[in-house]
Image (cartoon, rainbow, N blue to C red):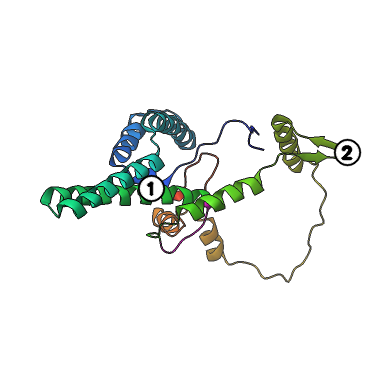
């Protein structure tokens, strides 16, 4: 189970990156520097693809273990508290303790945000330190959703590539069936839409309507194939 390899991990945008001011600046620079020609849908798709590659490179270059940082800061805080007990309060120790507590709070917030997002749980008290709980839920969810074996007819599949191909073929069959002849309704007394209603339904969406829907959506939703959630779109 631990050695099961289902292929490369898909890209996932983490909300904790939005806390990093450098990331905010870099995304804007990357987006504006990507010049793509073509129709708007193609341009948007290519720019997201390029941006995803840039973020992966940035993440690999600046990747650090938040848990290790937290442990180090907790150890430093313990040392400072022992110094306070033995030496008494001083401006230097007070400033050092304040700096460590600020770093700890930031680390707790980033780590909890990451695991809360992985567990896909909505939590009211975001200030609570529930990282272990979110970590447990995330691992249980991943184990539950993982497909290690698949039975197709009388054959049991164990290879990840074969399982993926079988699932793809199954879904592909839903869209390749022959079109069936369906009966047509011949009713003269059906209620019909007015011309004003028809024009309203055919009218294009306004920018205000699109922004209104976007702002009222849950930030962690719409985790599509590109890996960007609504928090990314709201922020940028």
Q: Quadrant of the N terminus?
A: top right
Q: Mark 1 highlights which residue?
A: 110
For the point 64% across and 46% down, the residue is 143
Is there a contact, CB below 8 Å, between mark 2 and mark 1? no
Where's residue 14, x and y in %? 44, 44
For the point 40% across and 55% down, the residue is 211
**Image vertical order of residue 123 relative to residue 51, above or below:** below
Where's residue 119, x and y in %? 53, 51
Is label 1 in a helix, a strand or a loop?
helix
Q: Mark 2 highlights which residue?
A: 154
For the point 40% across and 37% down, the residue is 65
Where's residue 162, x and y in %? 74, 31
Q: Nearer the viewer, mark 2 or mark 1?
A: 1
Closer to us: 120 or 131: 131
Alpha carbon distance from label 2 to label 1: 47 Å
Q: Is residue 179 magenta?
A: no
- The quadrant holding residue 5 is top right
Q: Which residues are magenta?
A: 119-125
Q: Residues within 10 Å of mark 1 (few under 14, many from 20)?
A: many
């Amino acid at each position: 189970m631990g050695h099961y390899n289902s292929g490369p991990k898909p890209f996932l945008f983490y909300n904790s990156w939005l806390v990093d001011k450098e990331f905010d600046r870099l995304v804007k620079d990357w987006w504006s520097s990507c010049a793509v020609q073509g129709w708007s849908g193609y341009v948007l798709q290519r720019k997201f693809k390029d941006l995803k590659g840039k973020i992966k490179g940035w993440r690999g270059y600046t990747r650090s273990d938040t848990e290790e940082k937290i442990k180090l800061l907790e150890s430093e805080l313990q040392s400072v508290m022992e110094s306070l007990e033995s030496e008494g309060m001083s401006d230097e120790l007070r400033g050092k303790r304040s700096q460590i507590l600020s770093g700890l709070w930031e680390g707790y917030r980033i780590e909890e945000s990451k695991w809360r997002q992985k567990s896909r749980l909505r939590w009211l008290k975001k200030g609570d330190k529930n990282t272990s709980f979110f970590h447990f839920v995330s691992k249980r969810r991943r184990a539950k959703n993982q497909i290690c074996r698949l039975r197709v007819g009388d054959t049991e599949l164990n290879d990840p590539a074969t399982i993926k191909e079988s699932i793809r073929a199954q879904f592909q069959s839903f869209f390749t069936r022959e079109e069936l002849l369906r009966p047509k309704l011949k009713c003269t007394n059906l209620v019909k839409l007015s011309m004003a209603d028809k024009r309203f339904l055919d009218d294009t969406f306004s920018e205000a309507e699109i922004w209104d829907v976007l702002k009222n959506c849950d930030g962690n939703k719409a985790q599509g194939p590109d890996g960007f959630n609504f928090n990314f779109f709201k922020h940028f």
